[in-house]
């Protein structure tokens, strides 16, 4: 297998992961509790979608780290509170302004910081702009993929800390796409998920 996704069972994830738009990109959908059943031995990449409850992830942290040490790719999306279960992840929460776009001339300041990274191919400002939840301190050697106007990381790829590729973001597109609002999140996933699969296939 190339790419599997955790499926905690929420309705918005049923739409995002099982709906016809993206379902073919995943080789398997597994519950968080199934991570210790050998499933990671049979794939190259794991997507942990937005708003996965970290309590369901903590029992499998050591297994996830072994997967990374063996060269795997783990993408942990926003609102999974990565800093509470992944060693070395530090996020600084920001107040979320859901209505910034109503202000004349408003610009959230989000931008792709590394257009050359495989995950960012085809992504631009429109694809990464809906709202913010927080920014991260980045480990030395990490690639910042999405940043705000102050240069703070909202998505980064860490290939140093664990040996594999750990991708961390505060963005929560799976929730909003699956809930049928915020079209930017669908534009983002239209590019990001195929990019993730393509990247994993050549790893």
Image (cartoon, helix red, strand yellow):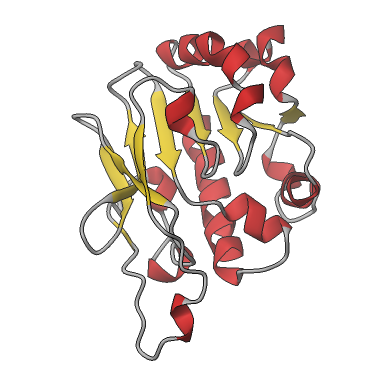
Q: Is residue 1 visible in this depiction of the protein?
A: no
Left or right, 180 with respect to 83, comes to: right
Quarter of the image with the C terminus is top left
Residue 195, image x, y percentages: 50, 46
Q: Residue 148, located in which quarter of the rendered image? A: bottom left
Asked if 165 appears above or below 122 in the picture, the reply is: above
Residue 30 vertical placement versus 130 (above, below): above
The residue under the point 53% across, 31% down is 201
Q: Nearer the viewer, residue 48 or 72?
A: 48
* Number of marks in picture: 0
* Quadrant the N terminus occupies: top right
Along the line of sight, which residue is nearer the eye, 118 or 40?
Answer: 40
Q: Residue furthest front?
A: 95
Which residue occupies 50% across, 76% down? 99
For image coordinates 55% across by 37% down, the residue present is 80
Q: Nearer the viewer, residue 105 or 140?
A: 105
Q: Nearer the viewer, residue 44 or 173?
A: 173
Q: Is residue 176 visible?
A: yes
- Residue 146 placement (x, y as % from top left): 34, 53
- Please report the residue visible at 60 percent of the width from the left and 44 percent of the height from the top: 50
Q: Is residue 98 left or right of residue 169?
A: right
Q: Position of residue 166 (x, y in %)?
A: 41, 29
Residue 92: give x, y in percent of width and height.
Answer: 34, 44
Quadrant of the image occupied by residue 176: bottom right
Residue 160 sits above or below residue 134 on the image = above
Judge left or right: residue 35 versus residue 46.
Answer: right
């Amino acid at each position: 297998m190339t790419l599997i996704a955790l499926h905690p069972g929420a309705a918005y994830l049923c739409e995002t992961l099982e709906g016809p738009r993206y379902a073919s990109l995943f080789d398997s959908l597994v519950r968080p509790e199934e991570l210790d059943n050998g499933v990671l031995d049979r794939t190259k990449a794991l997507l942990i979608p937005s708003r996965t409850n970290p309590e369901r992830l903590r029992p499998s942290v050591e297994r996830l780290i072994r997967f990374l040490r063996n060269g795997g790719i783990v993408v942990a999306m926003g609102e999974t509170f990565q800093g509470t279960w992944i060693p070395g992840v530090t996020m600084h929460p920001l107040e979320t302004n859901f209505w910034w776009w109503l202000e004349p001339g408003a610009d959230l300041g989000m931008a792709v910081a590394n257009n050359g990274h495989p995950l960012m191919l085809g992504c631009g400002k429109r694809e990464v702009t809906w709202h913010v939840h927080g920014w991260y301190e980045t480990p030395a050697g990490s690639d910042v993929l999405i940043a705000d106007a102050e240069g703070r990381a909202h998505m980064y790829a860490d290939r140093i800390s664990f040996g594999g590729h750990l991708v961390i973001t505060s963005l929560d597109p799976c929730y909003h796409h699956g809930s049928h609002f915020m079209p930017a999140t669908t534009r983002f996933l239209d590019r990001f998920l195929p990019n993730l699969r393509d990247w994993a296939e050549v790893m």
